[in-house]
Image (cartoon, rainbow, N blue to C red):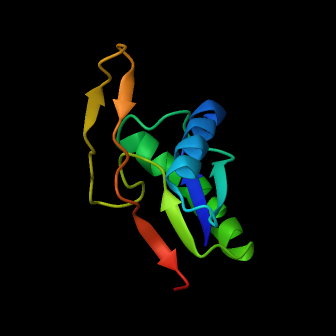
Amino acid sequence: MYLNVVNPNTTAAMTKTIAAAAAKAARPDTVIRAVSSAFGPASIEGAYDDAFAVPGLLEQIKAGEADGADAHVIACSTTPGSTRRVHWPMRLSSESAKPDFILPPCWRIGSRS
């Protein structure tokens, strides 16, 4: 399977973290294309950022489609461009004060299977 995992913000460090988490969770034969938007907000903090993220997000989905992706994953705790806001749980790691994110189920917006 070829997954197009899109970070809808422009923060490269976050995309790197997302890519590592996706690779760890994926089957061995899964190819992951982890990318961030070329333009948009550095982080998504509210409705303005959410809307501002949509054009870059759609460009990366379009690029993934052109590259032959089987499915697209929006790696965000909300669903940019949607009126449906989804907030996923977060817990603190017992070993540090840094957040230990519980990865949500993938929100697939397209699939060839």
**Of 7 and 30, which appears nearest the observer?**
30
Residue 18 percent location from the top left of the image = 55, 43
Residue 50 percent location from the top left of the image = 42, 47
Task: Please identify the quarter of the rendering in which residue 16 is found.
Answer: top right
Residue 88 percent location from the top left of the image = 27, 45
Residue furthest to the right: 67
Residue 48 percent location from the top left of the image = 41, 42
Left or right of 28, for residue 46: left
Q: Is residue 70 above or below residue 19?
A: below
Task: Please identify the quarter of the rendering in which residue 93 is found.
Answer: top left
- Which quarter of the rendering shows the N terminus? bottom right
**Of 9 and 30, which appears nearest the observer?**
30
Residue furthest to the front: 28
Left or right of 113, for residue 87: left
**Of 92 and 15, which appears nearest the observer?**
92
Name the residue located 45 percent from the left edge and 41 percent from the top edge.
49
Evaluate whether residue 7 shows in this view.
no
Name the residue located 28 percent from the left edge and 34 percent from the top edge.
90
